[in-house]
Image (spheres, rainbow, N blue to C red):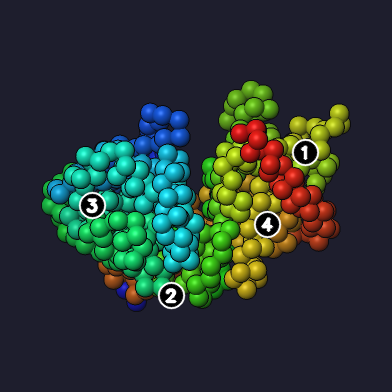
Amino acid sequence: MGNTWGYLLGIDVGGTAVKVCLFDLSGQLLAKYAADVPVLTPRPGWAEIDPNHWFRHIAQGIHYVLKQGRVSPDQVVALGLSNMIGTVVPLDKKGAPLRPAIAYFDTRSAAEAEWILDKAPEIPRISANRVISGNTTVASILWIRRYEPEIYKQSALFAQTGTLLFRWLTGETAVDWTNASFMGIFDYRRKDWNSDVAAKLDLDLELFAPVEPPHRVAPLCAKVARELGLCPRTLVALGGIDGAMSSLGVGAIHEGDAFDVSGTSEMIAVCLSKPVLCPELLARWHVVPDVWVLIGAISTSGAAWRWFSSLFGGTQDADLYERMTNEAAMAPPGANGVIFLPHLMGERAPIWNSHARGVFFGLSLSTTRGDLARAVMEGTAYTLYWIMELIQRYGGVSFRRVVMAGGAARNRLWRQIKADVWNVEVAFAGVEESSALGAALAAGVGAGIYADYEEAVRRAVPQPKDPVFPDPSRHQVYERGYQIYRRLYPALSDLWHLAF
C-alpha cells in the first residue's frame, strides 16, 4: 500500500481547451478549471496554437483549483500531464517555442506524408500506425524543414505537447511512449526511435526527446513553482496522450477491457496482451507496461449530434439536446429506414478518406425529425461497430463490456442504441474527467503513492455505473441497417472524390 495522504493534479491539454483537475487519492474530483484555447487558422487547412495560452491557463487553473478545493500547496504530492495526439512545436536551445504549435488536425503536410511513405514505406509496419498529415508528427516537422528553413535550423528540439509541458515544468526533456507512438519514427518493438527510418528521412535523432515511461517523474523547478503557486520539487509525471490517460482513468488496463471516449470526436479501443497490427486502425502501448491497445477513432460523432440539433432543433436553449433526444426516442429502432453516414469532416477509422461527407439515406415524405435524430445516433454506432469487428478480427478478443466516458456518454438513449447495435453491455464510467484522472494516477504511480497501476485503479477509479444491455430483437433490426450502411460507403466513395 502506498501513501494515504495528499492530493494530485491532472492537467489535460486538448485541441481547443485546457483543464486542470484536483483529485484526492481516492480519485474524487474536488475542483476543476476549464478554459478554451483559440486555434489560429491563417490559411485553409492550417491549425496552430500559441503555447503561451497553455502555460497561462495551467497557471490560472492550478491557482483556481487549490483555492476552490481548499488545499495548500504543500499538500499537492504530484501532478500529471495529458495531451492531444501529434501536435508539435520547435524549441530553441533554451526551450522557448520558435513558432506556434502545429495541431494534430492541421492538414498542410499531406505532401510530406506522401513523401515519407515513398522514402520509408516500412513505417506503418515499424510504428504500427498510418502516416497522416498532422496526426503523424514528423510530417509537420518536415513541412517546417521545407517551408520554414530558418526556424528548422534554430530548432534544438521538436516537442510534442507533453514534452513541451514537461520541459517547461521541470527543465528536463523526455517523451512518453504513447506520444512517441505517433511521431512516425517510433519502433514499437524496441519502444525507442528507429535510427534507420530517421536516416531515410534525413532526421537527426538529437532533435527528439528520449523515450520514457508515462510515470517518469521529475521535480517542479523553482521558477515555475512560483508562477503556479506550488511548492518547488513537487513531482511532475510525463503522462501521455489523452486516449491513453482516459483508458487508465476508466480502469481499462487488462486484456479484453474496452473503452469508448465520446466528445466532439469519438474513439473506441481494446486492451490486448501482445502487439497486433491492423492497417485500418491505430495502435500503441498502454500506459501500463506490456499492454497493447488497438484504437479506432471517428471524426465527428458528438459534432454530428450538435450540428443536427442546432440546425434542426429550432430555438437554441439549455434543453435543446434533451428535446432532440426525446424526439429520437419516439422513433423506432432503424429510424424508419433512414440511415446516416456521420462523415461530416472526412473520416479517420476505418476508411481514412478526407473526401468523405455526411449522408442521410432513405428519406421519404413520412420521415420525421425524430427519425433523422435517431439516425444520427445509429449512424455513429454503425461506424464504431465496423471498427469493433476489425478489432475482434485482428485482436482475437470478444467484447465483454464497453465502458464509456466523455460528454456524449451521458446520453442514456445513445448508450442503449450502441448496446443494441454492438450487442454488448455498455456502462457509463463513474468518472467526470477520465483523461485528467489518468494523468493524476500516472503521477501517483511515479511518486510512489500507488505501488503500481493495479493499485491506482483499485484505490482511485470508481466502478462503471448505469449499465445498459442489448435487446436481441433490436439487435436484429440493427443488423439489417448495418448491412445497408456498410454498402453505402463503397457505393459513394468515387462520387465523394469527384465532388470534393
Disc 1 to disc 2: CB gap under 8 Å: no
Number of residues whose C-alpha sits closer than 10 Å to that of mark 3, classed few (under 14), some (14–19) or many (20 or more): many
Number of residues whose C-alpha sits closer than 10 Å to that of mark 2, classed few (under 14), some (14–19) or many (20 or more): few
Disc 2 to disc 3: CB gap under 8 Å: no
Frontmost of labels 1 and 2 is 1
Residue drawn where x is 34% and y is 37% of the image = 49
Which mark, by number, is residue 290?
A: 2
Q: Amino acid at mark 2?
A: Asp
Residue receiving disc 3? 157
Disc 1 to disc 4: CB gap under 8 Å: no
Q: Amino acid at mark 3?
A: Leu
Residue drawn where x is 39% and y is 67% of the image = 187
Assign a secondary structure to mark 2.
Answer: loop
Residue lying furthest top:
315
Q: CA distance from mark 4 to mark 2?
A: 26 Å
Frontmost of labels 1 and 4 is 1
Which one is earlier in the sequence, the residue at label 4 or at label 2?
Answer: 2
Frontmost of labels 3 and 4 is 3
Left or right: residue 315 versus residue 190 is right
Residue receiving disc 1? 361
Assign a secondary structure to mark 4.
Answer: helix
Frontmost of labels 2 and 3 is 3
